[in-house]
Amino acid sequence: MVKKFATLISALVMLSMLLGACAPAPTAEVKEIVKTVVVTEIVEVAGTPEVKEVVKEVVITATPAPVKQKLEIFHWWTAPGEREAADAMFAALKNNYPDIEVVENPVPGGGGVSHRVVLQARITAGLPPDTFQTLGGAELKNYVDSGILQPLDALYAELGYDKVIPGPLLKAVSVGGKPYVVPLNMHIQNILYYNLKLFNELGIQPPTTFDELLAACETIRAAKPEMACLGLGSKEKWGDAFVFDSILLELGGADWYVKLYKGEIDVATDTIFSDALAKFQQLIPNINTDHSGLTWDQAVSLVGSNQAAMTLMGTWAIGAFVKGSNWQPGVDFGAVTFPQKPERVLLFHPDTYGMTVGAPDPEATMNWLKVVSSAELQIPTDVTQGGLFARTDIDPMEFPDPIRQELQSYVAANPGMLILDQHGSILPATAQPIYWDIISAFLVQPDIAATVQAVANMMTTYNVKEASAWYLWP
């Protein structure tokens, strides 16, 4: 039997010289190189060691070149103001991870209105991006229930992110007790913006209740009969639900509001819901008559062009005033959350990002999510785009306007006063647009009994009580 004792150093030297002289530079494409080499070995023959030269083929695996990290992302921030906010996000990513290449909305039509359609087509085809923008609430739950997103509880534990965001925000991005996305902001829905110079001229205090709103409208109508009191854009219908929500909040309070959208209130017999519709009807003469053809930003521009005195819209309207009307907060327009009785509740939704199941580059995606959670990204992005910071440990004075400075301070001191809004949606995603249709139809033909019945039918048809049971508040 022949036993191999050792391979001499000369063989190793020869091999290294051959590799150095003949092997091409390693590339990502070169997997293996086969070389014929002469190796000197000591072998034992009949108990006597002998030196022999042996010809062998050696397979060498080349060291691959580093693979460039790539982040494929879908988002809908493509409009003016939003585009700049997206640029701020990616600048923060590049500052922390300069080697990550960002590929935005890689399929034509992937941004804006068609974002969700194109995204879902990609997912259905088994070609998910690494990450995509989604709202918290019912929209997020749809993705989680469909097995599209990975849980991020380990990332949250690593970052301690649950300790620096409000509890209701954490619940809005969690399903089954696990967070699935990282929020970078909070948008507040129920803000009443008003023409500050007009209010000062007429001596009107910003209304914080429905009765104060009607009284202000009477004063405005008497002094400025050509001006609408409340500018509204109903083209996308959710703006109508925004206004109605404020009435519901005042009459029912926070607990009742949550129970309503969780399907735990029988609207067919509940007087609060029908009373809210009656007040909504009272408001109709004070709304611009062309509301059905306007979008939300056009409603904001009515105030900015002195055609309306007020509008009820989310924090993103600040950017619309500044960029669209060249109006400055605290100078040309003011804002109050509405209503503020029986308590001051903020209806909100977050913009978020997660990691898809089967993400092409999970390492780049995880690094992206870490940056999304950081103050370094949130400060320039949220200041530009219009929301509040998701992190309540960021100084509110980072905002340039007094409106968000005050709102951020209030959230930090009163985190339990946040409830999901019409965009975040406590209602299941399938029921939400049906509800918007019903409320918008009421403004055109205000039939209280028919509207109550339509909402009651919606609650039953879409099994809202069961479908919305996941949502916990505060």
Image: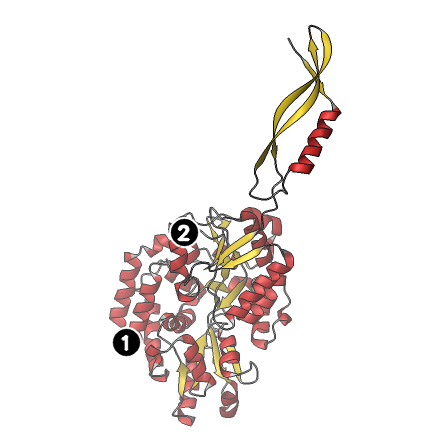
SS at mark 1 in the image: loop
x, y percent for residue 158: 61, 48
In the image, taking residue 435 as reference, residue 149 lies left or right, namely right
Q: Quadrant where the N terminus lies?
A: top right
Looking at marks 2 and 1 on the same chain, the residue that comes earlier in the sequence is marked by 2
Residue at figure coordinates x 57%, y 44% from the top left: 28
x, y percent for residue 34: 59, 31
The residue beneath circle 2 is: 123
Please tell me how crowded label 1 is: few (under 14), some (14-19), or many (20+) other residues with Cα within 10 Å.
some
Residue at figure coordinates x 37%, y 84% from the top left: 286
The extreme bottom residue here reads 223
The extreme top residue here reads 46
The extreme right residue here reads 9
In the image, taking residue 432 as reference, residue 314 lies left or right, namely right
Q: Is residue 373 visible?
A: no
x, y percent for residue 116: 40, 60
Determine the image quadrant of residue 424: bottom left
Amino acid type, callout 2: Ile
**Which mark is nearer the camera, 2 or 1?**
2
In the image, residue 157 above or below residue 263: above
Q: Which mark is residue 87?
A: none
In the image, residue 453 above or below residue 468: below
The residue beneath circle 1 is: 446
Determine the image quadrant of residue 11: top right
Amino acid type, callout 1: Pro
Determine the image quadrant of residue 305: bottom left
Residue at figure coordinates x 52%, y 79% from the top left: 323
x, y percent for residue 463: 31, 54
SS at mark 2 in the image: helix
CB atoms at circles 2 and 1 under 8 Å apart? no
